[in-house]
Amino acid sequence: MMCLRDIFCWAYTLIASRAFTSRVLDAYLSNHPSLKQEEEFQIMLPLVDFSNHKPLAKIEWQAEATEIRLKVVEPTFTGEEVHNNYGPLNNQQCRCHSPGISSLANIQQ
């Protein structure tokens, strides 16, 4: 049986490694000012966190009332991996905050 500390650590790790900032929702929130928060907040988007990090990947997040899309803004070919861009993370940040991200994919270091 899991103790409260184990459950907390599991939940914290899940959010630290998979959550997005509310900036993903900026386009949607700009059309719904009553929902806008003063500060950024963390959100979970199940299955949207599937893609690996590539620092220079050209992508756009698009949010609407019922869906959120990851749009690839560069030529992509059948069978090619789709990447997300988590911003300028160094290798240590990639390993510590997103265990699914390969440090080899981070060419900015």
Image (tube, rainbow, N blue to C red):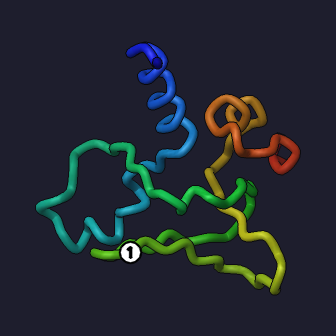
Residue 13 lies left or right of residue 28; in this view the side is: right
Residue 94 lies left or right of residue 46; in this view the side is: right
The percent position of residue 70, horizontal first and vertical second, equals 55, 72
How many residues crowd mark 1 within 10 Å: few (<14), some (14–19), many (20+)? few
* Outermost residue toward the front in this view: 1
* Outermost residue toward the left in this view: 34
The percent position of residue 99, horizontal first and vertical second, equals 69, 37
* Residue at 72% from the left image edge and 80% from the top image edge: 74
Give the secondary structure at mark 1. loop
Q: Quadrant of residue 80?
A: bottom right
Q: Quadrant of residue 64?
A: bottom left
The percent position of residue 24, horizontal first and vertical second, equals 43, 60
Residue in front for this viewpoint, 48 or 74: 48
Q: Name the image quarter holding the C terminus.
A: top right
* Mark 1 residue type: Glu
Pointer 1: what residue? 67
Task: State whether residue 72 is above or below residue 56.
Answer: below
* Residue at 78% from the left image edge and 35% from the top image edge: 91
The percent position of residue 49, horizontal first and vertical second, equals 57, 56
Tag count in the figure? 1
Q: Quadrant of residue 66?
A: bottom left
Residue in front for this viewpoint, 6 or 63: 6
Residue 30 lies left or right of residue 11; in this view the side is: left
Task: State whether residue 71 is above or below residue 109.
Answer: below
* Residue at 36% from the left image edge and 63% from the top image edge: 25
* Residue at 42% from the left image edge and 50% from the top image edge: 44
Task: State whether residue 57 is above or below residue 21.
Answer: below
